[in-house]
Amino acid sequence: MPSAALRPLSAGELLDVSFGLFRRLFRTLVTIQLVCMALPFLINVYVAGTGRQVSAATLLGALVGFVLSALASAATAVAISGSYLDRPVSATEALRRAVPRLGPLLVVSLLVGLLVVLSSIPFFVLFAGAGFTLARNGAAVSGLVIFSMLVGLVSLVLPLMVAAGVAVSTPVVVLEEQVGAVEALSRAWFLTRGYRLRIAGLLFVCLILIMIPYMALLAIGGALAGGAAQPVWIAVVALLGRLLLTPILYCLLTLLYYDLRVRKEGFDLEMLAASLQPA
């Protein structure tokens, strides 16, 4: 057990340990992503080569990508958890353990998306109303329009807090036994209570750190592509970005899960007691 790390961590320590785990498990995490993303990548390349924006292949690629992305996230959480608790597992073992949890994880992914969309309705309604008013009155901007837009921006706090509240639902599904989708969301909501603003800030910083190199990769790929091959280049760069950057986010989410359990449930003491039990 990593006694130095299995304790309440500051925001900076969480980010630092996340990147450290990513470096330590680089080969394992990239292997998991490669196994899970190879088929969706080939479908996306085929779609890009045909030049058709909407087709049966596009829908198939989206469906396969959704399922295999969930599998990759589950296997990644297993691998990160094993390393963090000093019980390392291989990419093959992580994938094997993740497969039985795929069903609940797919349901959780759909429910999380639905909750975030529903909590975003006030934002969309207010901005749609402001846009309709502007379209009807021409270029004139009234105080009511400005007020609606400001309230709409403030209402974005709601989906952010909802997303933060269920952020650790994937680790809950994967790392706790016999947890259903609804139960996982409820447990994640309990664990994050009182820490959601902190979690939202950490996720925002992590996404910024991830998006900067990802956008740079896209820009380089677009510059090198030039002509008709650009959609294929974008698919290649998107896969490369997924391979290198997505595991960092799951490192952070898994560490957040354990950090919350340490803070709320004394998980560090539980692990210490288990390690002292006679064999």
Image (spheres, helix red, strand yellow):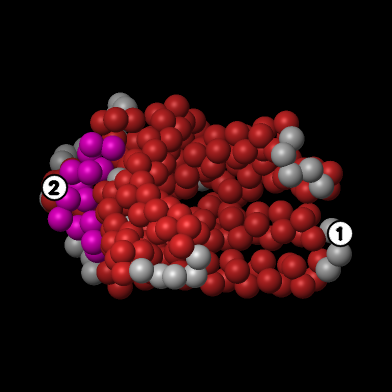
Percent across and percent down for residue 190 are: 18, 43
Q: Residue at x 24, y 63 (%)?
A: 198
Q: Is residue 194 magenta?
A: yes
Q: Based on the displayed image, in which of its 4 quarters is residue 230 positioned?
A: bottom right
Nearest the viewer among 110 and 22 is 110
The quarter of the rendered structure image containing the N terminus is: bottom left
Q: Which mark is residue 265?
A: 2
The residue positioned farthest toward the front in the image shown: 137
Helix or strand or loop: what does disc 1 sit on?
A: loop
Q: Taking the image as drawn, is residue 42 in sight? A: no
Which sits earlier in the primary sequence, circle 2 or circle 1?
A: 1
Q: Is residue 163 magenta?
A: no
Residue 57 figure quarter: top right
| Residue 257 falls left or right of residue 229 | left
Quadrant of the rendered image containing residue 236: bottom right
Our reading of the magenta stretch's main secondary structure is: helix
Q: Which residue is nearer to you in this view: 85 or 247?
A: 247
Write the start and end of the magenta stretch as one range.
Answer: 185-200
Tell me the element at label 2.
helix
The reply, left or right, for residue 166 in relation to residue 75 is left
Q: Horizontally, is 132 left or right of 216 in the view?
A: left
Q: Is residue 49 left or right of residue 174?
A: right
> In percent of the image, x 29 and y 49: which residue is there?
162
Q: Nearer the viewer, mark 2 or mark 1?
A: 1
Q: Nearer the viewer, residue 70 or 58?
A: 58
For badge 2, the amino acid type reads: Glu
> In this rendering, does residue 113 appear at all?
yes
Residue position marked by numbered label 1 in the rendering: 228
| Mark 1 surroundings: few (<14), some (14-19) or many (≥20) residues within 10 A | few
- Which amino acid, mark 1? Ala
Say which quadrant the C terminus sits in: top left
